[in-house]
Amino acid sequence: MATYKVGDRVSQGKYGPGTITGADDHHIVIDFDEHGVHTFASSLVVLERTSAPAPVRAGKARRASKTATAKTAKAAISKA
C-alpha cells in the first residue's frame, strides 16, 4: 500500500484530483479541487499520485478587529 503525506497531490476515481490535508493509519482526508473535503478509510480508498497543480483559491476576507474599528471611528470623529 502506498503511503501518502499531507500536501501530496492525488486523484481518486469519483472525485478527481485533490490535495491530502490529513492522514493517519486509519483515515485519509482529501480536499478535492471541485468537490470539497472528504474522509476515506486508508485501507479502502484507491488513489493515484498526480502532477496536476492545485487550483488557486481566493483567500478568505479578513474582518477588522474591534480595536482597529474603534481607532478608525475615533479618527473619523476627531477629523469632523
Image: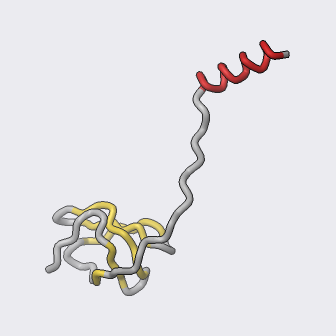
Residue 66 placement (x, y as % from top left): 60, 25
Residue 51 placement (x, y as % from top left): 34, 80
**Vertical comparison of 28 with 73: above or below:** below
- Residue 6, quarter of the rendered image: bottom left
Q: Nearer the viewer, residue 23 or 64?
A: 64
Residue visible at 39% across and 80% down in the picture: 52
Please state, as top left, top right, bottom left or bottom right, where the N terminus lies in the image.
Answer: bottom left
Q: Residue furthest left?
A: 1
Q: How many marks?
A: 0
Lateral position of residue 15 relative to residue 48, left or right? right
- Residue 5, quarter of the rendered image: bottom left
Lateral position of residue 15 relative to residue 43, left or right? right
Q: Residue furthest top?
A: 78
**Vertical comparison of 14 with 71: above or below:** below
| Colour style of the rendered protein structure | secondary structure
Q: Nearer the viewer, residue 3 or 76?
A: 76
Q: Residue furthest front?
A: 79
Residue visible at 16% across and 78% down in the picture: 2
Residue visible at 69% across and 23% down in the picture: 72
Residue visible at 57% across and 42% down in the picture: 62
Lateral position of residue 25 relative to residue 17, left or right? left
Q: Residue furthest right?
A: 80
**Vertical comparison of 49 with 73: above or below:** below
Please state, as top left, top right, bottom left or bottom right, where the C terminus lies in the image.
Answer: top right
Residue 26 placement (x, y as % from top left): 20, 66
Residue 35 placement (x, y as % from top left): 49, 73
